[in-house]
Structure formats: structure tokens, C-alpha cells
Amino acid sequence: MDYEPAIRLVVFILVFSVMASWELWAPRRALTISKKLRWFNNLSIIFFNIVLVRLVLPVLALDMAIQARQHEWGLLNNADLPHWLDIVITIIVLDITLYLQHVIFHAVPILWRLHMVHHADLDFDFTTGLRFHPIEIILSAVLKVAVVLIIGAPAVAVLIFELLLNSLAMFNHGNVRIPLRIDRLLRFWVVTPDMHRVHHSVIIRETNSNFGFNLSLWDRLCGTYRDQPVKGHNGMVIGLSQFRSAQKLNLSRLLILPFSGDPGKYPINRH
């Protein structure tokens, strides 16, 4: 894994460039907030999170996978399965783990406060997919480390999953137009932008739906799938009803939002 940082950087730059160009060429909705302002805030918090995670966590998911392999920790390291099957199992287990994590962050009020930073974006584009509060990022990283240890995930599978996660998070938050027929086909396998955009509606029942990031299967199986927003994609309002001022959602405000902002009535267990 000597080239792992370079692989991550190349994939990130490639997907970032593709999504930025796609949004410029075929936008799904007209943006309501200055892209310059939003991108500065979103990209700043992304950079902040990368640095913080490297400083705070001595072991990340990929590191744990390597150590688990060396010490034969975890289920897959003690099972005689084909390597390709280990990879498939790892990707599926990590994906449903993050689906359940997402549901829990909507269900538990104190965790919802952290997750508000993601939902408080007043527009929806691919940078929204990487905008999370640092504490949420750390909690998610710790969870992934624990799951990787328990299942004994192969390092290559962890790297593939994390590349998929970051790439598809940008894709399914993209403000991009996809023909309806193609969107319908893609939804059988992955979360599309039109599917996930519903999750960013100010309407509570829509916010608490479509939790998946990668595979769309989990929402269908768990009864959290919602096909379309009630007001349509061009008529829906993005964000949270209690935060409607872009000027009050700068980087410093986003960092303290969980501790000072009104959580509203969005957590699932309030309904």
C-alpha cells in the first residue's frame, strides 16, 4: 500500500473534475446561493477534517486491515474463502454499516446535532457529499476501524470501499441532470443524485428517507426508500428549515453549529 495516498489523491481529483464539469454542463437545478461562498466553506471543512483525522486517529481502517491480516484477527482472516469473496463481503458489510450509522445519526438527537452540518447546506451539489462535522468524521472513522477489525477485512477491499464511498458520495450529491430512464436503471444498484436529493429536503418525512450512500438496496429492504420529493426536484427546498441564512453558515459557524444551533424537529425518534 505504498502508493495508497497517491491513488486516493488521483481518484479524488479525477472525480472532482468530472463532477464539477458535469454540473457546469448539465445542472439539475438552478443554485440559489453563491457557489464561491459555499465551495469555500465546504472545501475548507473537508481539508480541516482530513488534517484532523490524521492527527487524532493513530490507526485508520486501512491500517487496521493490514494489522489484522498480519495477526490473523477477524472472521475473514480465519475463514478459507476466495480472496474475491472476501472483498465482496467487506464492501457489503461496510456499506450496510454506514447505512445504519446514517440512520442512527438521524435518530439520536445528540448525533443529529453533528449531522446537521451536512444537512444545513442551502444548495445541493457534489461538495455537499464531503461536508461533515469533524466529530462525525472521527466517529465514523472509529466505527469503520472496529468493523474492519471484527470481520478481518482485506486491505485492498478497504481501499476499494473508501474510494467508492468518496467517489459515490460526490456523485450522488451532484447537481447533475440524468435522463429519467437511465436514473431508473441506476437506482436498482446505486444511489443516484435524484434519489439522494430527496434526503436533503426541508420536509421532515423526506429528510428521514433515502439514507444510502452507495448501494440503494438498504433503503428498499429497510423501508426507508422514497421515490420522489412531493414538490418535485425543481420545487423542493434544500436544507433545514431553521437555518436559512447563508451568511450565518460560514466555516466557523459550521464548526460550532452542533453546540449552538437549533436541532429543530428532524430526529426520527421525535416522530
Image (tube, rainbow, N blue to C red):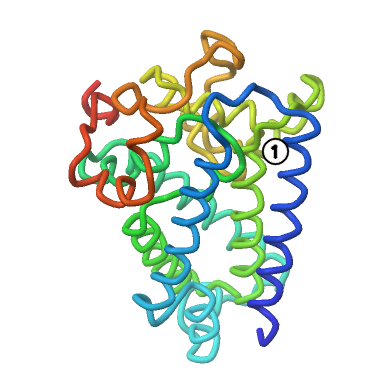
Q: Identify the residue shown where x is 67% and y is 39%.
A: 190
Q: Residue furthest top?
A: 231
Residue nearest the observer in this picture, 16 or 85: 16
Q: Quadrant of residue 143?
A: bottom left
Name the residue: 64% across, 26% down.
Answer: 194
Viewer-closest of 116 and 164: 116
* Extreme-left residue of the structure: 260
Residue 201 position, x and y percent, is: 46, 22
State whether residue 59 is above or below residue 117: below
Examine the rendered structure and indicate whether residue 145 appears above or below residue 102: below
Within 10 Å of disc 1 (Cα), the crowding (few <14, some 14-19, many 20+) is few
Q: Is residue 257 left or right of residue 129?
A: left
Q: Quadrant of residue 80?
A: bottom right
Residue 119, image x and y in percent?
A: 41, 35
Give how far across and how far down residue 50 sits, in percent: 47, 67
Q: Quadrant of the N terminus?
A: bottom right
Q: How many marks?
A: 1
Quarter of the view holding residue 110: top left
As shown in the figure, which amino acid type bears the numbered disc 1? Trp
Front-most of residues 164 and 137: 137
The correct choice, above or below, for 230 with respect to 200 in the image is above
Relative to 264, 66 lies left or right:
right
Secondary structure of residue under mark 1: loop
Q: Which residue is mark 1?
A: 189
**Residue at 56 percent of width and 28 percent of height:** 197
Locate the C terminus and report the quarter of the image it occupies. top left
Where does residue 136 sit, x and y in percent of width and height?
35, 54
Nearer to me, 26 or 138: 26
Which residue shows up at 51% across the image and 49% down it?
40
